[in-house]
Amino acid sequence: MLPLRPTPRTQTEFRRRIRIFGLLILLVFAFLTYRLWTLQILQGKRYTVMSEHNRIRLERIPAVRGMVFDRKNRLLINSRPSFDVRYTPGDSQARETTLRRLANMVDGDSERFMEAVQHTKGSKGVTLVRDVDWPSVVAVETHRPDLPGVYVSVKARRSYLTDAMTAHVLGYLGEINTQQLRDLRRKGYRRGDAIGQAGLEKRWERHLAGRSGGEKVEVDAIGRKVRVIDRLKATPGHNVVLTLDLDVQRVAYDALNGREGAIVALDVNSGAVLALVSTPAFDPNSFARGMTPDEWRQLMADNETPLHNRALQGHFPPGSTFKIVTALAALQEGVISPTQRLFCGGTYKVGNRTLRDWKKHGHGHIAMHQALVQSCDVYFYQLAQRLGVDKIARYARRFGMGAPTGIDLDGESPGLVPDRAWKRRRFGTPWYPGETPLVAIGQGFLGVTPLQMASMMATVANGGTVYRPWFVKRVLSAEGEVMEEYGPARTGTIDLRKENMAFIRKALLDVVHGRRGTGKRARSKIVDIAGKTGTAQVAEMRGEAVKSEDLPYVVRDHAWFVAYAPAEAPEIAVATLVEHGGHGGATAAPITKRVIETYFRSEGYDMDVEDHEVPMVSAGPGPNRVSHAN
């Protein structure tokens, strides 16, 4: 059979199909040409950079923060190696499977991991677990091929070697917040950085932080580092040397034994802080490792407010410790002579109000020396009426009360020194005569901080110079070069007649060593201590006197003792407050004695002073429900 010959119709159809097919091929090639031109010419630079980023990455190297030492170069804060588990979503296709495997290895929560990475894309990494233990590090590194995108980074983690003991001075670190990031981004800070949030860590951030560096690294398909292409070294932070004495700080912290209170010790002749303790306290290491939401809620809900720095943020009535100011004001103003006697019968009437002395039947006829030694309230009620509240307030302010001392820590309370003008502004009412006697014995509207009371006592001890409390001695580079150095700063001088100052200082010595002194429990066999007790009323009680220990805890009196030593050539001043601690002479005085003795032992003094002790005589039958002066 002969083959069929194509007809003109079939030939025409064939040619049409050939043209269509050829056109399709041309369109495909045109599209491919266009895409190649777009990718290589129009967007070539962009995709080159993206490709390079898949292979080359920039990794930031945070700087190691500076170390902190006490005055004898004992280490207080260091930085230790810490391992964080991070994840880069762009290096992993099976995200859910990878994170589930990781959670099993590090005892984590895969759902929480998924939430953490859901808004993270590409080569941007996110930290899933901070400060993991060594077995977890080994597990992750061993199974890296099964964990694409997961890697362990090593960074320096803050380590507070003294735990809670120095928490309120040294402060703590926390992740930078949005406002801080907005203010500090130009200085190199980035989201996720740790920054000082309180105390020394915050106020000396610019010295301690250092400057971050970085690495340009080549990675493989699953994000593993192949080699380092370039590196910019991080600059470590500066080291800081404090005026704190670790021995004194430790004894002060241990002596409070977790009770609510504060102890401040100052160098009399410079204002340098030797110890600053507030309890209850917190462990700053919990912030350094990353506090969980449950831990934060528990800390914030604690009724004892461990984050509150009682030493400089607390606002307390000073009780009878304030009688030092009242006595000096009376002598300077000449409203009474040191030898003039006033009668104390146990009560004092002002208008229709009767104020009591802590001693039920009174002290009889008494002059200023014994009024201070025995802490006679009625004597000071009468001084108050002679002085008036405005003069008392003026002298209190000269000693630094009613205003911040200027210490380089955040949140310092100014306290409150009331006068006629203040009450008119605050309440729109006049000052009543019955309010002045309360101020004279450290009650009423009057409020101070333990730091202010320590500063007041240092001023009395040094003869009238008011120093700004300070606690940073010098700043050193990582190589030990002195970058900055600090020293005493006078903020005022009180022009007091020498004979008046000598008189008050003799009385303060006899408060501790005198036969009827209320501070007998501060007597030391190694150093002469001079001081003043105070028992400050928390809530006013009407009617019969009630012992502090018989009251509910929250309304028990605060125990105070302020002191300096040695009495003849003072070096250290201490203010001790024990909240709801009852009698200052019984509770705060022996604590202060331990702190002062520790200071002199720490300084290597070989002291053996003459024993001033005399037969013990009761200072009184019980607390005064107006001031609890003892």
Image (cartoon, rainbow, N blue to C red):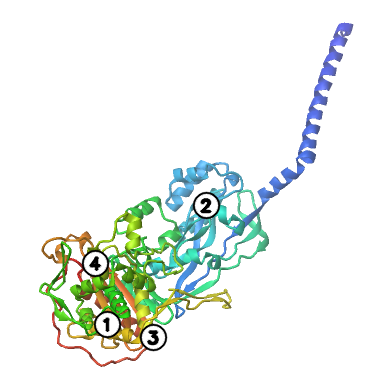
Dot 4 falls on a residue whose secondary structure is helix
Between marks 1 and 2, how big is the CA–CA gap?
50 Å
Which of the two discs, 1 and 4, labels the residue nearer the N terminus?
4
Q: Amino acid at mark 4?
A: Leu
Pointer 3: what residue?
A: 603
Dot 2 falls on a residue whose secondary structure is helix
Between marks 3 and 2, how big is the CA–CA gap?
45 Å
Dot 1 falls on a residue whose secondary structure is helix
Residue 286 location (% of width, % of height): 41, 60
Pointer 1: what residue?
A: 508
Q: Amino acid at mark 2?
A: Gln
Residue 196 location (% of width, % of height): 49, 61
Between label 3 and label 2, give the one nearer the viewer: 2
Between label 4 and label 2, give the one nearer the viewer: 4
Between marks 1 and 4, how big is the CA–CA gap?
21 Å
Tell me, for residue 179, which label it has, or none: 2
Which of the two discs, 1 and 3, labels the residue nearer the N terminus?
1
